[in-house]
Amino acid sequence: MKVNQVAACRGDSRPARGLSASLVLLSLLSGGTPAAADTLYVTLEKDNALAVVDGAAGKLVKTAKIGKRPRGIVLSRDGQQLYVATSDDDVIQIIDADSLRKVGTLPSGDDPETFAMDPEGKFLYVSNEDDNLVTVIDIAKRAKVKSIPVGVEPEGIAVSPDGQWVASTSETTNMVHWIDRAKLEVVDNTLVDPRPRAASFTADSKQLWVTSEIAGVLLVLDVATRQVIKRIGFKIPGVTAEKIQPVGIRIDPQRRYGYIALGPANRVAVIDAAKLEVVDYLLVGQRVWNLEFSPDYARLYTTNGVSNDISLIELPEHRVTKSVAVGNYPWGVVARP
Amino acid sequence: MGCPTAASRSAPCPRASGLAVLRTRVFQGLLLAVSVVLLLGPADGAWARKRNAADKTASAAKAPAQAAQPAVAVKLGFLTASVTEGVGPFFDPIPPDLGVQGARLAIGDNNTTGQFTGQRFELTEVVLEAQADPLPAFENLLQQGIEYVLVNLPAEHIVALQRSVGSRQVLVFDVASRDDRLRAEDCAGDVLHTLPSHAMLADALGQYLLQKRWMKWFLVVGSAPGDALFAAAVERSAKRFGAKIAVRKPWEHSFDDRRTPASEVPVFTQGVDYDVLVVADEQGAFGDELSYRTWLPRPVVGTQGLVAAGWHPVHEAWGAIQLQHRFREKAGRGMREVDYGAWLAVRAIGEAATRVRSVQFAAIRDYVLSDTFALAGFKGVPLSFRSWDRQLRQPVLLAQPRALVAVAPVEGIIHPKNELDTLGYDESESGCRLSR
């Protein structure tokens, strides 16, 4: 187990299981605060429901039916509303995060799966897999702004934190399509490895990370040139290469570590985000899909599609501490302070 | 052989009648007839049953600026024998546009990608009368400058085609046959096979039965030519995985007419100690009558019951549900194995053209046959062509009519190079030797 001592002092002073006394002392000296409570919302693809989990306690609080085949989920900037793609209803639902009642719908286009929000929280960008489109939605007006043609089976989508780009990956065309947010047009395309899945910008908007499910790699693209600058493979003793199918990505805001869900390899890869090297593999539940940080970055949550649970990973120790059964096919997760 | 494929055991689907009507009207004579160039967008005119919104949007959309140079077309042909009317049970007739719909979908996919690469793909479809000589139509395609020909034809016709190719620049994609002979003594360097062979299907079943420890097999063989070939593959698998063929019996359709399946099957299966009944009946002539009627309570596997298949209506993992949806929306019916075989062939060409950034035949051919070629076929692993026999290596689905049971290679079966090569003839066993 790798423990980054500097990181360990930052903002985390819960009982430090396994850590040395000196680290605990350091932690106290640095003025760490107790882990803040958070609430997780997990979409359950097969249960047509949303699971609500107390993240700090690691306990399932309740489950609410919401619509057919819920997958992508995003929390509004004010934390009051959840946007959930109920794929087989062909809409994105607006759900009150307290009451879990549906308060409206957004016109997402057919079969919405993944979507991303702009930094101001005003627009959503939706991948319409069956139609080869990215649909832009004005949240306040609850109206479609534009449909942008992209490659076959658009999947991953991300908005750069500086607001300049929307990156859309297409799984069968095998490209990243660079949509200029001001023009709402594709202005460049980058060919990537087969079946690109998730895409995620670094906080400084300088890099785009893309996972390729079939090649089993993480690609790091330079945003300025829109070229691939690093191709990171994964090797896990006792796990065949075919089982390594990278999907979800989370990168911490300091760009210290990046985390990659490896699907049926049942691991999360920890990437040194400065050196762009794999530093650890964390064993989690089966077929790990998507990842999310707690709002204070003290934990990482994983949705595990086959074992029907979520795993809790303590940061920065990179220690898997708990799994919480949530329901059938947990897909997406957001954390609310 | 009006039905050269094993697709008759695919899922029920609505009958697509437009094509059949058109064909019978047009094909009075000997051969070919309709030659339709398919482009992305509204170009497939009368045959377009249901255009989805996406196609309209995509065709209306302007290609991005950086791909604005005039696109050079990659020309493909599809040569298929017409489906004999009335084949298949009433609830699951063989669609007349079998295979062609898969090719059309993939042409659309290639052209969507082509918007960003400045490449364009065209398909010319030719439907032959059942049993007609395919050579004149094949020559005609080559004369039109077509360099890639997809074929859904009986094995003997494929052999005839490959002998006529000579040194000419053409790749033939066999998108339907199972016949191991085409991958062995009758193999050819320019003929690629996209669906699993009999040996691959039988090995997939064999691996699963080994995992279940159901090691005593009762083999029932139908009278169609393909049945004997599949049965031979099953016997080879039994040897490979250490199973025992307890008995092999032909099903001869020669029973007293007064006897029903309910009285015949118990007698047929009586007196043998076995774990599982393996049936070889590609046409579906009797295999569906066996389940629940055997003397001993035993499961049925093979061409009925638990089937091994390259594609199946229940398959949804690894994004397969997206392909199922897109196909159904375009074709108005479910995707069958031959449709998948054709989709794979067209996508293989498209993938190569994208990667080599070229539409030159030699560049595409070399890339398709190279070690770096990796096709995403909705089965979780990259697919590629075996260098020794031009067979597309791929996982095989094991499914019952309404649920997926397993995917081969099954857990625990290992191989020094690629576990997919535990299915079918590995390099050292192959009767075909091809150098690149």
Image: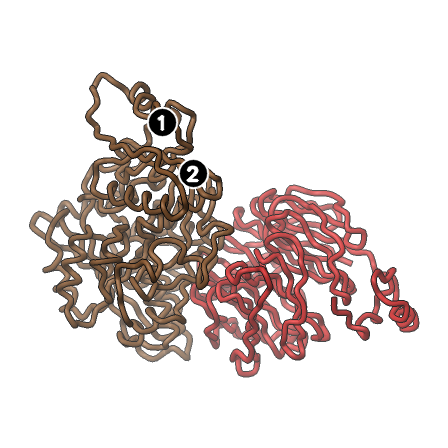
Q: Which residue is mark 1?
A: B272
Residue found 72% across the figure and 62% down from its top:
A293
Residue found 77% across the figure and 67% down from its top:
A316
Q: Is residue A312 left or right of residue B170?
A: right
The disc numbered 2 marks a residue on which chain?
Answer: B
Could you say where residue A334 lies in the image, as x and y percent from the top left? 69, 57
Could you say where residue B428 lies in the image, as x and y percent from the top left? 34, 61
The disc numbered 1 marks a residue on which chain?
Answer: B
Give residue B69's quadrant in the image.
Answer: bottom left
**Dot 2 surroundings within 10 Å: few (below 14), some, or many (20 or more)?**
many
Q: Which residue is mark 2?
A: B215
Q: Residue furthest left?
A: B29
Looking at the image, is A156 positioned above or below residue B119? Answer: above
Q: Secondary structure at mark 1?
A: loop
The reply to the same-chain question for discs 1 and 2 is yes
Residue found 34% across the figure and 72% down from its top:
B367
Could you say where residue B409 lies in the image, as x and y percent from the top left? 45, 52
Residues at discs 1 and 2 in contact (Cβ within 8 Å):
no
Please indicate, yes or no, whether residue B382 appears anywhere in the rendered image: yes
Label 1 and label 2: CA atoms lie apart by 14 Å
According to the rendering, which colour does chain A have? Answer: red
Q: Amino acid at mark 1?
A: Val
Looking at the image, is B233 positioned above or below residue A157? Answer: above
**Dot 1 surroundings within 10 Å: few (below 14), some, or many (20 or more)?**
few
Query: Which chain is the one coloured brown?
Result: B
